[in-house]
Image (cartoon, rainbow, N blue to C red):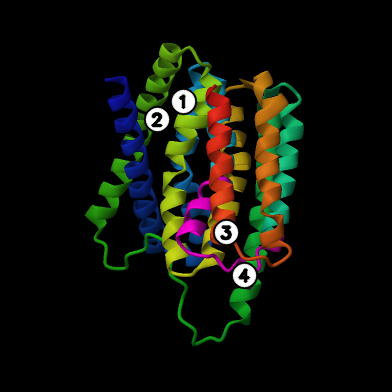
Amino acid sequence: MVYLTAILGLAILLLAGDALVKGAVNLALRVGIPALIVSLTIVAFGTSAPELLISINAALDGVPGIALGNVVGSNTANILLVLGIPAIIAVMHTSQCDSRKSYVIMLGATVIFIALAFRGVFDWISGLVLLAVLAVILGDNLRDSLKHRNSMKAEDPEEDVEGADPDMPWWKIILYLALGLIGLPLGADLLVDSARVIATRFGVSDTVIGLTLVALGTSLPELATTVSAAIRKQADVAIGNVIGSNMFNLLAIIGIASLIAPMEVDREFLTFDLWVMLGASLLLMPFVLFGRDLTRTWGVILSALYVGYVAYVLI
């Protein structure tokens, strides 16, 4: 039953997160918030809501290994698996997209996160530092987006916003918001409790479960989005999805969770897992900075590296 409960919790989390994004996006647009602001804030935060609720629940329940493992494991999975599998399906011509600035910022966020981890605890000080970095990045993104918007011709159509439906009735907006706000904490509670039981049953640490089961489960939306983008030959969407998700995981999720409850850093993170996450991030360098295409061969290599990492962690 514990496995079914874990699957149920994950399913509720993913569905509730999607419902919350749809409800929040359409509510914001209805009350007159510009689509640009909605894209940079509500959509970005909303798609990370499942990971955020898991980390908060885990921190409050005294299992920081699941909270930190979820983020570190998700970031590793996002690069090795979420980019690896789509590359096997279809070659991603990353040489045709420019994500260099975002990639360098992601590397910087990763280094800052690792430096804070060596304090031994993610507390309110770490939380404020991470959220301050996030605020600077969002401000820079907003400035760049406004500059781009102003350079476009006046007759160009408004950019689509994920989850936006101009014809959505008010009752449906309220329903989506209610489902999201109720489902997210319920799903997070079920998944965290089940993960703790599974860890105890197999005699492994909460950290291992966070790095594998929980992290892989919460990376499924990113995998679905990236596979779809690869099939449509949209390498920029695939790379942007991974880079953006990784930055939000490190800065927003752990930043907010750290303000709610302090999380001690397990020694396993300091000696191995954080460096794997950084190494995986550096593997993107040839594709983002030097214009190499993400071919099927590289897709196999990245996917195999992730399988090897999970096997090592579990053994």
- Residue at mark 1: 57
**Residue 34 shows up from this direction:** no
Give, as a three-letter code, the residue at label 4. Cys
Depicted 54 relative to depicted 142: above or below = above
In three-dimensional space, the C-alpha distance between marks 4 and 3, rounded to whole angstroms, equals: 9 Å
Residue at (58, 69) in percent of width and height: 93
Residue farthest toward the front in the current orientation of the protein: 297
Q: Quadrant of the N terminus?
A: top left
How far from the left and from the top, in percent, is residue 161? 43, 65
Residue at (29, 42) in percent of width and height: 178
Q: Which of these two is toward me, 105 or 203?
A: 203
- Residue at mark 2: 188
Q: Please state the extent of the stretch shown in magenta in the rendering.
A: 80-101
Disc sitting over residue 97 in the figure: 4
Give, as a three-letter code, the residue at label 1. Asn
Which numbered disc, 2 or 4, marks the residue closer to the eye? 4
Does label 2 or label 1 sit earlier along the sequence? 1
Which numbered disc, 3 or 2, marks the residue closer to the eye? 3
Q: Which of these two is toward me, 111 or 76?
A: 76
Depicted 285 relative to depicted 267: above or below = below
Q: Are marks 4 and 3 in contact (CB under 8 Å)?
A: yes
Q: How many marks?
A: 4
- Residue at mark 3: 239
In three-dimensional space, the C-alpha distance between marks 4 and 1, rounded to whole angstroms, equals: 38 Å
Does label 4 or label 1 sit earlier along the sequence? 1
Q: Relative to residue 303, is residue 124 drawn left or right?
A: right
In three-dimensional space, the C-alpha distance between marks 3 and 1, rounded to whole angstroms, equals: 29 Å
Q: Are marks 2 and 1 in contact (CB under 8 Å)?
A: yes
Give, as a three-letter code, the residue at label 3. Ile
Badge 1: how crowded within 10 Å, few (<14), some, or many (20+)? many
Depicted 62 relative to depicted 117: above or below = above
Q: Secondary structure at mark 2?
A: helix
